[in-house]
Image (cartoon, helix red, strand yellow):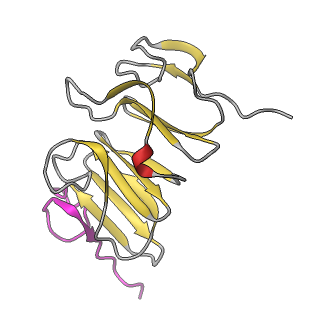
Amino acid sequence: MCELPAGWCWGRSEYGALGLGDVRSRTVPTPIPGMSDVVRVAAGYQKTCAWKKDGSLWCFGDLLMDEPSPAIARVPVQMKELGHPVEEVVFGFRHTCARTAGNIFCWGENTEGQSGGSELRALMSPVRISGLTGQAVALAAGDAFTCAITAEGSAWCWGRGTDGQLGTKRKNSSARPMRVQLPCPG
């Protein structure tokens, strides 16, 4: 019987995105200390998250992207605020969102409301997104916006809306989820 693998990373590690305790890039796969029983990984720009068999989520790298960032994690940090099991993680350019049993939590840059915080500043801890009607079943993130699909089939977006990203016919940004105005099939 095989044991579940350890986490392995390679590539650029300018902000500790490999979880190896330093910022040296690696050209070969290198095991991440303490990351056994890894079952899934999500990688974004200068940050990485990994799920363990027990459902816990561990993230590392530049979790805020502000320089100098107090949230640079050069080794894996358990995201205890989320509880678990964490079902999905998505990365925007400067923010991260996770879905747990229908709830959505976001953290990181929030200059356009993309992390859902009422104050337009970086969020060092995950914030629960409220205002969705129904349970979230899927997430997506863009440069400075986030969208969710609910079990009822409605779409909701928040963050930068200056180019119509929120699907509301307006070009306003919003930290509060806005229901996307989908046309009814004819």
Q: Is residue 102 above or below residue 56?
A: below
Say which quarter of the image contains residue 152: bottom left
Does the magenta segment cover residue 26? Answer: no
Q: Which percent across, then down, holds residue 66?
A: 21, 30
Q: Which percent across, then down, holds residue 151?
A: 48, 74
Give the side of residue 184 with respect to residue 26, left or right.
left
Residue at image x 60%, y 28%?
7
Does the magenta segment cover residue 173? Answer: yes
Q: Quadrant of the N terminus?
A: top right
Give the side of residue 42 with respect to residue 122, left or right.
right
Q: Is residue 132 above or below residue 101?
A: below
Say which quarter of the image contains residue 130: bottom left
Can residue 142 be seen in the rendering of this structure? Answer: no
Can residue 143 be seen in the rendering of this structure? Answer: yes
Q: Is residue 172 above or below residue 142?
A: below
Q: Which percent across, then down, holds residue 9?
A: 54, 23
Residue at image x 25%, y 63%?
166
Q: Which residues are magenta?
A: 160-186
Give the side of residue 162 with respect to residue 57, left or right.
left
Most prominent secondary structure in the magenta stretch?
loop
Residue at image x 43%, y 51%?
82
Q: Quadrant of the C terminus?
A: bottom left
Q: Is residue 39 above or below residue 9?
A: below
